[in-house]
Image: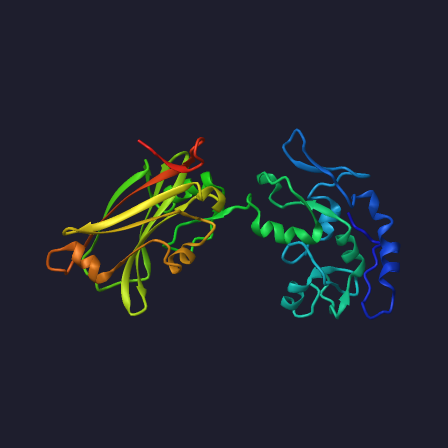
């Protein structure tokens, strides 16, 4: 629906913004309430905001009015317009080289003050409402919330390529299995052997990603070689396929050794919200120097043969003492 009587004026025209606000908003109250109170689901499963004079859904005309026609993201001040009234966000204004993408007229430096006032008066559901987020926020607070919303999709945890796939955990599990051919295991213990014919050739690439399913959750075990300063190292660490709060409920241990020596690591898995590179660069895992790795490998020290074992357990609260006790899977 077109809002032909919304005036968008240059911020240099000398008009009082309050006058513009009063003149242009009085007809908009029929479309949206400035204080919705609730979120209900209709029979089709669509989320609708209710409360106030009328209800608005995330895809109403008012919401579409605040959508940039170029990038389709929500527009935030400064909102720009051309002389014919076509609007776009400030980011896209610099990309279109001062030419209106709708009518091809020169954009100039005109602010759409009325539309900015409209935005200030509205509240909307989080854009992840269809994924389960029940929150409602003032229009200008949406971006901050959506950047950290617990219902936002997860990035693909596969580190061997620049994969841009996002989705919920069940979708990503199927994606890892079918598209990346990742090994899937059930159980909370693991025993892996890593072999490399020339350990002096270290590349910044993930050697292996294995997914484990235990306690009703999924975990990603990473093992890779990379350069740390001037020396190559080997690193293993675990990531939890879920949010950080849930990841803290679990612990894991990793062990590598040979010839009567061993290295052991114990810690809390990081959430896949933290990128693979972030975890690796923080050294939050079992790190094996090359000389030690070759010692564990034995033989003529010309071939890397590492066996990494480990287990995952869930921390449980003792109702009598309040202390955490490990819950080991069988």
Q: Position of residue 297 (x, y in %)?
A: 16, 54
> In this orientation, which residue lies closer to the viewer: 181 or 306?
306
> In this orientation, which residue lies closer to the viewer: 234 or 8?
234
Q: Where is residue 183 in the image (x, y as percent from the top left)?
A: 32, 42
Q: Which residue lies furthest to the top in this view?
A: 43
> In this orientation, which residue lies closer to the viewer: 196 or 320?
320
Q: Is residue 214 visible?
A: yes
Residue at 74% in and 46% down:
61
Q: Position of residue 156 (x, y in %)?
A: 44, 49
In the drawing, does residue 307 fall left or right of residue 39? left
In the drawing, does residue 294 fall left or right of residue 252? left
Residue at 65% in and 42% down:
135
Q: In this view, does 184 lie above or below 194?
A: above
When asked about the image quadrant of residue 150, the answer is top right
In the drawing, does residue 150 fall left or right of residue 295? right
> In this orientation, which residue lies closer to the viewer: 49 or 166?
49
Q: How is the image coloured?
A: rainbow
Q: In this view, does 40 lie above or below 150?
A: above
In the drawing, does residue 295 fall left or right of residue 96? left
Residue at 40% in and 59% down:
282
Q: Which residue lies furthest to the left in this view?
A: 300
Q: Where is residue 140 in the image (x, y as percent from the top left)?
A: 69, 54
When asked about the image quadrant of residue 37, the answer is top right
Q: Can residue 199 be seen in this view?
A: no
**Quarter holding the C terminus?**
top left
């Amino acid at each position: 629906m077109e809002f032909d009587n919304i005036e968008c004026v240059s911020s240099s025209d000398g008009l009082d913004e309050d006058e513009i606000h009063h003149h242009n908003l009085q007809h908009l109250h029929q479309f949206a309430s400035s204080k919705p109170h609730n979120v209900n689901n209709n029979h089709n499963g669509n989320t609708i905001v209710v409360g106030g004079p009328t209800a608005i859904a995330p895809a109403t005309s008012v919401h579409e009015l605040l959508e940039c026609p170029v990038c389709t993201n929500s527009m935030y001040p400064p909102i720009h317009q051309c002389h014919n009234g076509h609007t776009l966000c400030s980011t896209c204004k610099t990309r279109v080289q001062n030419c209106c993408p709708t009518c091809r007229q020169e954009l100039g430096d005109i602010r759409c003050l009325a539309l900015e006032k409209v935005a200030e008066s509205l509240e909307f559901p989080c854009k992840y409402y269809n994924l389960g987020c029940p929150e409602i926020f003032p229009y200008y607070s949406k971006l901050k919330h959506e950047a950290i919303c617990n219902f936002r999709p997860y990035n693909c945890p596969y580190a061997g390529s620049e994969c841009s796939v996002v989705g919920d955990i069940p979708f990503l599990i199927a994606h890892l299995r079918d598209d990346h051919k990742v090994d899937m295991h059930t159980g909370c213990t693991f025993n892996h052997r890593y072999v490399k014919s020339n350990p002096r050739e270290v590349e910044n690439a993930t050697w292996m990603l294995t997914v484990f399913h235990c306690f009703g959750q999924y975990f990603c075990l990473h093992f890779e070689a990379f350069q740390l300063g001037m020396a190559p190292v080997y690193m293993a660490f675990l990531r939890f396929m879920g949010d950080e709060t849930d990841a803290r409920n679990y612990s894991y241990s990793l062990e590598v050794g040979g010839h009567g020596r061993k290295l052991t690591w114990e810690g809390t898995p990081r959430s896949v919200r933290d990128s693979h590179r972030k975890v690796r660069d923080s050294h939050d895992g079992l790190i094996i120097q090359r000389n030690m790795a070759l010692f564990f490998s034995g033989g003529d020290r010309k071939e890397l043969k590492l066996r990494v074992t480990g287990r995952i357990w869930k921390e449980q609260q003792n109702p009598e003492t309040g202390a955490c006790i490990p819950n080991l899977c069988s």
